[in-house]
Amino acid sequence: MPIHPDPACIVGAFEHPTRKAPDKTVAQLHAECAAGALADAGLAKDNVDAYFCSGDAPGMGPTSMIDYLNLRVRHSESTDLGGCSYLALVAHARDAIAAGRCDVALITLAGRPRSEGHSGTTPRTRAGTPEAPWEAPYGLSTVNGYGMVAQRHMHEFGTTSEQLAWIKVAASQHAQHNPHAMLRDLVTVQDVLDSPLISDPLHRLDCCVVSDGGGALIVARPEIARSLKRPLVRVIGAGETVRHGRAGNVDLTTTGAAWSGAAAFAQAGVKPADIRYASIYDSFTITVLLQLEDLGFCKKGEGGRFVADGNLISGVGRLPFNTDGGGLCNNHPANRGGMTKVIEAVRQLRGEAHPAVQVKDCGLALAQGIGGNLATRHGSATLILERQ
């Protein structure tokens, strides 16, 4: 679908600095993230006339949070595609602005899984869901679902644990420069391989961190964006989808990024080769590898070779990724990492990333998210962002 010739811009971005918040409520974290994004944009709360959130928002989602934040809005929305929801919501906010339904949209994320003791090692299938009778008896968890996907990719294409480990190595190279990152120590390929096996073939260091915290974004009408005297980050391409088991016709090596990415590139009128920086959802190392293939940065089955030997390290490789350390090293707030993928892409386009990892002349960035489980059903959302 064509977009407005002058699309809305991301004018505010804020990542909560905390990684453990036992003394805060989820609603309080949402509010602190909202205040941070508004301050970054140079806007006041009363400028906001639309609110967007996802399943992490407490209570009745927009209804509860609009009340808690004391907003006066004329448009609201809650969309839950798991961790990629916030990328989709950026596009929804852009489209709502183009349709005249709002001028300034606030999107928030927050959660406390670390304080509450949540991880990816316990079964996730909830009673009453359509899939429960078929999956609950087998105890599917997040980590063993992703382990199964990694095993399949290795079987079909010869991908190795050493190649997956390079993704963690790249993330650690970037995280050392982030004072808020949970894991700032440099790791080697051997360190990853020597870490405990969690779900064969995934080791502990193939897995993301579990953190509290959150983030927020402000999307505004282009006329408002230009008045704020901030670098303009235009949302020029977007796509989203849900990939599922297709009634048993399962392909464990293809993610929804194959569809959401194609839509975003087509809408933006650019190619993977044009992208200067990529934020790629990294719940596990295998998650990154599959999305890079499906987005077209390399051919299917060649992801292992693409990520090896530092190709994802800023200043070293061909495609710098997750220069904040990503979910593998920095944070994974509310077990939903899509928000921070957009925030770091905005930093790169503004030239505000850490100097050690800032991509030179970064004018075009991609943010890609996955939400759910690659082995069963998941949402996927892709954004193409441009510095004007």
Image: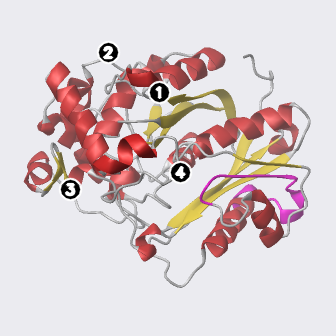
Sequence-wise, which precedes: disc 3 or disc 1? 3
Q: Quadrant of the C terminus?
A: top right
Instruction: Report helix, strand or loop for mark 2.
Output: loop
Residue, disc 1: 257
Q: Amino acid at mark 1?
A: Ala
Instruction: Report helix, strand or loop for mark 4.
Output: loop
Residue 93 drawn at (x, y percent): 76, 40
| Mark identifier at residue 128 | 4
Q: Amino acid at mark 4?
A: Gly
Sequence-wise, which precedes: disc 2 or disc 1? 1
Q: Residues within 10 Å of mark 4 (few under 14, many from 20)?
A: few
Is there CB contact under 8 Å for labels 3 and 2? no
Sequence-wise, which precedes: disc 3 or disc 4? 4
Image quarter of residue 205? bottom left
Instruction: Report helix, strand or loop for mark 1.
Output: helix
Sequence-wise, which precedes: disc 2 or disc 4? 4
Q: Say if residue 178 shows up in the picture.
A: yes
- From what the image shows, is residue 346 above or below residue 91? below
Nearest to the eye among marks 3 and 2: give it: 3
- In the image, taking residue 54 as reference, residue 163 lies left or right, namely left
Residue, disc 2: 299
Calculate the distance from the C-alpha at mark 2 to the C-alpha at mark 1: 13 Å
Q: Which residues are magenta?
A: 40-56
Sequence-wise, which precedes: disc 1 or disc 4? 4
